[in-house]
Structures are given as structure tokens and as C-alpha cells.
Image: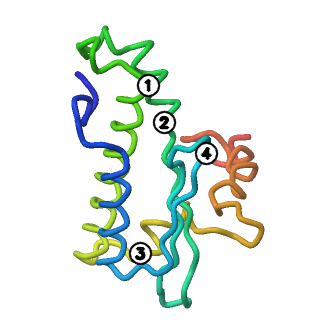
Amino acid sequence: MPLKNYSTEIPVDKTVTDMQKVLARHGAKSITVEYDNGEPAVVRFRYPTQFGELPFRVPVAVEPVWRYLVNKGQEVGIDRRFRTKQQAARIAWRSGLDWLKLQLDFVDTGMVSFEQAMFGYLTAPGGRTYYELMVPDLKALPEAGHSTADN
């Protein structure tokens, strides 16, 4: 089955603007975009929470989408015209917007708090996300299905 958004024609810049608008409508402050080689790569924003206004950093990785299109695109039925680097960027950003909207739907309905939905993207002092800081600890956890008593 092809990727969601595989055939989108929406330019990356419009999707980035859409993300900023969605975040602003949900109360985000100081929304900025970081660029890598002239292309959008990260959305940063501050959000008022029960713990004060907190910084978040949401990267949108185009390279994995590009690799998927190159390696699996034909196999999953994605037409050749949609297997370009530019299309990978459109797909990645549009999928990022969809993901963000879904997270905010969970928040809006009270299923989770904003902090729960976005914790992995919360930025620690020094600029890394809490997810990035936790990776070494996650690697040290026992395998799924095994208690520490099994080790």
C-alpha cells in the first residue's frame, strides 16, 4: 500500500505555513522554522503548559522518506513520477502536518495532555529533545516481555 500523501502536490512552504497556523491556533508561541541547506528541516515553538511555557523542537526528516521511495516505491505501487527527492519532501512535511493535527485532536478531546502528546519533542537545556537524551536509557531497558527478574 502506498504512503499516505504520496501523491500530494502541495508545496513544502505551504505545508510549513499550515503547520505554523495549526500551532498558533492551538496556543503555540514563538514559532520558528530552521533550515538545512535552504530547505525547512525543523519547527520550533514554545507552548504554555501547566509547567510554564516550554520549548519544543519537531524535526521533519525527508531523507528516510526519500530512501523509502527509492527502495520500496515501485514495490508498493508508487508511480515513478512520485519517486523524486522533491516529492519526498512534500510527503514528509504533509505527513508531519497530519501527525501534528492528530496529536492536537488527542489533546483537544482530553485523551492526553499537550505535554504527553509532545514529550519526546520537549527541548532540554542545550537544545536536544528529551527523547534524544533518553535514548541511552531506553537501550538499557530489558527487552519487551522480559521482566528484570528474567535477566
Question: What amino acid type is highlighted by mark number 2?
Answer: Val
Crowd around label 1: few <14 · some 14–19 · many ≥20 (10 Å): some
> How much space separates mark 1 and mark 3, taking CA atoms?
33 Å
Report the residue marked by disc 4.
36
Quadrant in which the N terminus appears:
top left
Position of residue 92 relative to residue 99, above or below, is above
Crowd around label 2: few <14 · some 14–19 · many ≥20 (10 Å): some
**Which sits earlier in the primary sequence, circle 1 or circle 2?**
2
Closer to the camera in the image, 119 or 58: 58
Question: What amino acid type is highlighted by mark number 4?
Answer: Asp
Question: What amino acid type is highlighted by mark number 3?
Answer: Phe
In this picture the colour scheme is rainbow
**Which sits earlier in the primary sequence, circle 4 or circle 3?**
4
Q: Kindly check if marks 1 and 2 are in contact, taking CB atoms under 8 A apart as contact.
A: yes
Report the residue marked by disc 2.
62
Position of residue 28 relative to residue 126, above or below, is below
Report the residue marked by disc 1.
85
Q: Residue at x 31, y 69 (%)?
A: 21
**Which sits earlier in the primary sequence, circle 1 or circle 4?**
4
Instruction: Residue 146 in the image: state x and y as whole percent.
Output: 60, 42
Q: Kindly check if marks 1 and 4 are in contact, taking CB atoms under 8 A apart as contact.
A: no
> How much space separates mark 4 and mark 3, taking CA atoms?
28 Å
Question: On the picture, is 66 further left or further right than 143?
Answer: left
Residue 94, quarter of the rendered image: top left
